[in-house]
Image (tube, rainbow, N blue to C red):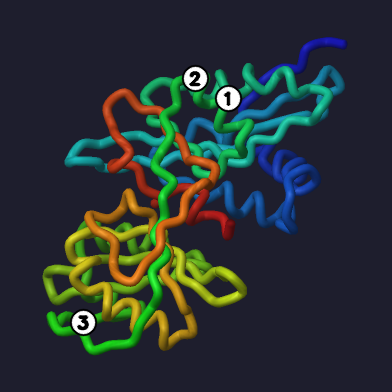
């Protein structure tokens, strides 16, 4: 049997690749959902939508999706490639490493994978990917009157009016995804932008924090946020400890998840967030 070839997922090939993911990835996401999700890209020069393996009959037998984003980190422009949906048919599993190498040999990028299985995570560690802290604070949402002032904005018109510059662009780039919820906590000129999604924890509604723009303001105004979430039926707030300088009270710490990984020569884990990635573009 001839060895499969690795080819980029081009615009023309994306529908077929999306159909492959729909057939072979777990979940009930349709091919149209996969295609729509992967078309969310945030770069001026899109190299591909990932890479796929094709056998000598031209059939897709594996692939890795990719999200590309141009970001500014610590005041410097940086380029990111977020790996998603790594899927290879069993018969061709030995080609998985070649597929991964093709992705990470692309020069000039920082690479992330936010949903690796244990096997995928182990494989990426072979390529020098670093693990991120998996500890997560589960904070009980309690009602209360905040003592340190501040406001909470959750209407789109109010949020857009309060933000400007790069902060406004981040909001506008992520406002289109219906599964994401946005609030600002703080005061005029000093806002923390919080992005969360609704989930279920121990059969109870919960809020999963995907992004917070200011650690200090988040902690200072957390009681206002938790009251807001509780009034909307969410009993707990879940936030990764690496996003925090301190853990709100009352909370328990959970760990033991498949660790997210990244590959970078200049950034550390505190520079890595979920903006412009599969965590926001797909309803995972």
Cα separation, mark 1 vs mark 3, equals 45 Å
Residue depicted at 46% across the width and 22% down the height: 106
Tell me residue 229's x, y (percent): 40, 80
Q: Secondary structure at mark 3?
A: strand
Q: Nearer the viewer, residue 236 or 110?
A: 236
Furthest toward the top, the residue is 2
What residue is disc 3 on?
151
In the figure, residue 32 lies in which quadrant? Answer: bottom right
Q: Nearer the viewer, residue 280 or 252?
A: 252
Residue depicted at 75% across the width and 23% down the height: 93
Which label sits on residue 127?
A: 2
- Quarter in which the C terminus is drawn: bottom right
Tell me residue 66's x, y (percent): 54, 38
95 relative position to 265: left or right? right
Query: Quick one: label 3, few (<14), some, or many (20+) residues within 10 Å?
Result: some
What residue is disc 1 on?
123
The reply to whether the C-beta atoms of the residues labelled 2 and 1 are less than 8 Å apart is yes
């Amino acid at each position: 049997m001839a060895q499969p070839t690795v080819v980029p997922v081009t615009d023309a090939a994306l529908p077929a690749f999306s159909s492959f993911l729909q057939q072979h990835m777990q979940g009930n996401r349709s091919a149209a959902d996969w295609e729509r999700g992967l078309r969310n890209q945030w770069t001026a020069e899109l190299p591909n939508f990932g890479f796929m393996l094709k056998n000598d009959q031209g059939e897709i037998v594996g692939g890795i999706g990719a999200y590309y984003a141009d970001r500014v980190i610590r005041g410097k422009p940086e380029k990111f490639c977020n790996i998603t949906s790594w899927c290879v048919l069993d018969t061709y599993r030995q080609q998985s490493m070649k597929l991964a190498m093709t992705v990470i040999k692309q020069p000039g990028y920082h690479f992330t994978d936010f949903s690796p299985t244990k096997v995928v995570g182990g494989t990426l560690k072979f390529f020098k990917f670093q693990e991120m802290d998996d500890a997560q604070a589960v904070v009980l949402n309690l009602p209360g009157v905040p003592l340190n002032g501040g406001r909470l904005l959750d209407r789109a018109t109010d949020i857009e009016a309060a933000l400007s510059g790069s902060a406004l662009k981040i909001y506008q780039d992520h406002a289109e995804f219906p599964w994401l919820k946005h609030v600002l906590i703080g005061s005029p000129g000093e806002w923390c932008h919080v992005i969360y999604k609704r989930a279920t924890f121990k059969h109870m509604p919960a809020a999963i924090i995907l992004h917070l723009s200011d650690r200090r303001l988040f902690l200072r105004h957390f009681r206002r946020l938790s009251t807001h979430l509780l009034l909307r039926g969410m009993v707990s707030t879940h936030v990764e400890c690496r996003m925090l300088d301190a853990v709100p009270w009352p909370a328990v710490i959970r760990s033991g998840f498949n660790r997210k990984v990244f590959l970078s020569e200049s950034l550390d884990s505190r520079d890595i967030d979920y903006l412009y990635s599969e965590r926001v573009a797909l309803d995972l």
